[in-house]
Image (cartoon, grey):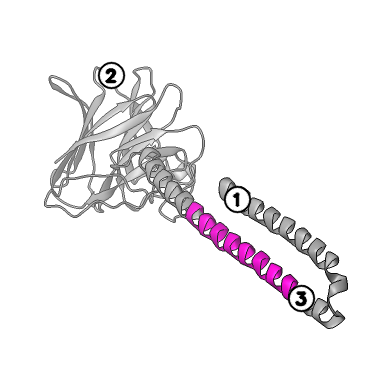
Amino acid sequence: MDQHFKMLMDQITESSNTVRKLQEDIHHNKQKMNPASSINGVTIVLLFLWFIVLYYAYNFSVENQTLTEALDEQQNRVHDIYSTIAESLVYHPMKSYRPKETEDQGAVMLDLDTVNHVLGVSADLKTAERVKAKLDYPNSNSRFDEAPQVLSSQCFSSGVHVWEVEAEGHWDIAVSYKSIQRKCKETSAFGNNTESWSLVHKGKGNLFACHNKTKTPVSRALQSSRIAVVVNFEEGSISFSAVDSTVTQLHEFKAELRQPVCLGLGLHHVDPPSRASIVKAS
């Protein structure tokens, strides 16, 4: 574009030199012409030169507009490409996603409508992690506003269900009624009400079984990061076991389950990292 502009400027300069030469010729021959002829000649020359200027100005304007449009188009393409790449590299916790219906009725994923603002959730809705800065989730009546918790999107009201969770840090793994309170920390924390049953790990190997504000120490030491949760509606039981090369039961609650229950995860510390992943459901 700079070369084209320079060429146009050279042409305009050449035209200006021509104008000056014509003016000198007109002045030299002025005495030889009558006034009317002189005026008409000057008028014609000036009009001719004016058309030349307009022609170059118009061409420059058209070319400049074309180049500008081409540049804008390329910038838009680059922006679209960058946006696509950025979208694939940067994870947005609230990106719209819902699991497809499947014949696997045991499939369990986390419900983004319930997740607390200090928990990040993976794109596959299987892992939750405690984060330092609050995440910008939209307001929801289902969301835990105070307790750093999340529920599964699938809840069950009959049968036997087994969920296996890999967890580290300071965590709660819970079975909770879907109707659990969400807005008050005291009444919504897993194990602190009549609507949830929780196994709590304090991060130093200490385990507690919690229900309705009653905290029971678990005597067995935790030797594995994988916990199996078994809910049996017919027997009215909820059990938590450590899964390694063998399965070791840690605690069992007896409960008459009258409402749909969900898997719940609570994550309490950033350092050391607290995270949990649903690795198996049946």
Q: In the rendered structure, which disc, 2 or 3, sits on the residue that comes first in sequence?
A: 3
Specify whether 89 is left or right of 249.
right
Amino acid marked by disc 3 = Gly
Image mark for residue 263: none
Is the magenta region chiefly helix, strand or loop?
helix
User: Which residue matches tag 1?
Assistant: 7
Helix, strand or loop at label 3? It is helix
Amino acid marked by disc 1 = Met
Helix, strand or loop at label 1? It is helix
User: Which residue matches tag 2?
Assistant: 219
Q: Is residue 137 part of the magenta span, yes or no?
A: no
Q: In the rendered structure, which disc, 3 or 1, sits on the residue that comes first in sequence?
A: 1
Give, as a single range, the part of the protein colored magenta: 43-71
User: Which residue matches tag 3?
Assistant: 41
Helix, strand or loop at label 2? It is loop
Q: Residue at x 24, y 43 (%)?
A: 255
